[in-house]
Amino acid sequence: MQYILLIYGDERQWGKLSPGETDKMYAAYMQYSKALGDAGVMRAGSELKPTSSATTVRSRNNKVTTVDGPFAETKEQLGGYYIIEVPNLEKALEWAAKCPGAVTGSLEVRPLPPPHT
Amino acid sequence: MLDHLIDQVFRRESGRVLAGLIRTTRDFELAEDALQEACARAAATWPRDGLPGRPGAWLTTVARRCAVDLVRRRRASPSWTSERLAEEAVTAAPEEDPAALSGVEDDRLRLLFTCCHPALAQSAQVALALRTLCGLSTREIARAFVEPEATTAQRLVRAKRKIRDAGIPYEVPRPDVFPERLEAVQAVVYLVFNEGYASTDGQGLMRPDLCAEAIRLGRLLVELLPDELEARGLLALMLLHDARRDARLGPDGALVSLEEQDRARWHQDAITEGTALLDAAVAARRPGPYQVQAAIAALHAGAARAEETDWAQISGLYGALLRYLPTPVVELNAAVAMAMARGPEEGLQWMDRLSTREELAGYYLLPAARADLLRRAGRLEEARVAYAAALVLVRNPAERVYLERRLQALGNPPFRPSGVPLETPGTPPE
């Protein structure tokens, strides 16, 4: 089964890190990605640029509105994701707990439905 | 009569049969639907043909055929998209006698851990455990928790859907998370017991049906995990509390305090069993919160008369319990025990410190316990105020009557002939 791990955190804290701390964080994520790869469970994953770079689009009655910013202001923001393939939720949760983002913020684990045939 | 017997069989066998069905079908919902249909067929044929020799095996065989039919029917309907369930898996599984098969107990253990998985809300865990392992109907669960049947039904449907969609596994947790998962299971069992023992909204104080189901689950846990001492502690704790069930309510439905209970009405068989379980667990010297609580209950149970209660030891045990469960409610009980061991003033000082804690605001037992200690200390005016404060907060009718009676026993507040000492019969709160 495929699961998406959505990594939420306070991006302002992220911005306040010193260069040394940022390097450390990236190193931790590199190591985590490598572990996922070595275990053969990683399908995709990436960091996201901060919400200040986000644009929200809605189309209503053939009229498109484009707004600066994320779709909702929240205390913690989506900062990255992984898609992994594991047998069940238990395994997905085990991997989620090991993610560096679980220490600094929260991870939301959501199953992806099987592809429609 | 036969209906009653069939009900008993369903209740006894359903957890076992369902657990096996989930293993073979790998689909929680399908297994349940199949079992339900098998039970319906049993209800239709058993009264005519008589009970089969091994009802559990009968139900398993029929339910399995029902599962195959259900899968075929679902495949025929266009809305059925999730086909990960292989019909062959069901049909290919050998006919087996559930009672004779090794690993059947593992099925029930897996089911218990699946039902109590932390990815499910606790209210859903409780409902699922009662539904699948105890075989209670949705209506019975709804009645037990005083909620509309539709609410319970929805809770169960959502939980089963989450198990399927999120892929909550049907397995015993791996060793590194096993202890916390076992705690979650025990918490669910104890929650069911407490809901039965001191219901907050029910008409009466106790709902013994829930207590009995919790004890059944507790027994199952001990049976499946014989090396887990805390599981034994939990079962001992429930048995020792349940032993007092007939003495806890007066003829008018009012709560009878532990001190005033007629100890001859305590169930000695439950006390004997609970104490034996506890003794065996404690001998292994790996204490935990349930064992400590059971030890406290055992000391109460062991006192032939209230005055013989070993409050010094109970007070010490509450100190130990606070290390595991540093909650304000445990602290309140610790304060009461200390007051009983060393006199009301020390307990009152502790409670005064506790009353500043936000978590206890609105908790009726704090003013109620304070009132009892104030009465013992002879500070009757303050006791009246505290009883009145508790009466504002109390919700359960049986507990309300108890408090009203206490308040009345203090007599009329303003005038009292001077020089006449008021009697202050001691009553330790439970």
Image: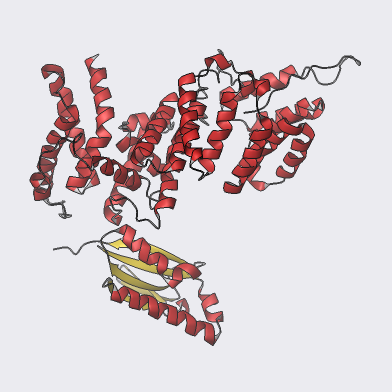
Residue with the most extreme right position: B419
Give the residue displayed 85% in from the left and 21% down from the top: B414
In the rendered image, residue B422, in percent from the top left (x then y), is placed at 82, 17
Residue B344 visible in rendering: yes
Give the residue displayed 33% in from the left and 40% down from the top: B224
Query: In the rendered image of this protein, does residue B92 appear above or below residue B201?
Result: below
Residue A57 visible in rendering: no
Q: Nearer the viewer, residue B127 or B81?
A: B127
User: Dividing the image into 4 quarters, which one contains the N terminus of chain A?
Assistant: bottom left
User: Dividing the image into 4 quarters, which one contains the C terminus of chain A?
Assistant: bottom left
In which quarter of the view is residue B379 placed?
top right
Q: What count of labels does the image hold?
A: 0
In the rendered image, residue B420, in percent from the top left (x then y), is placed at 88, 14
Q: Nearer the viewer, residue B268 or A24?
A: B268
In screen coordinates, is B200 left or right of B74?
right
Query: In the rendered image of this protein, does residue B209 appear above or below residue B102?
Result: above
In the rendered image, residue B409, in percent from the top left (x then y), is placed at 73, 17
In which quarter of the view is residue B57 placed?
top left
In screen coordinates, is B54 left or right of B416?
left
Residue with the most extreme front position: B283
In which quarter of the view is residue B37 placed?
top left
In the rendered image, residue A61, in percent from the top left (x then y), is placed at 31, 67
**Colouring style:** secondary structure
Give the residue displayed 14% in from the left and 18% down from the top: B50
In screen coordinates, is B248 left or right of B358?
left
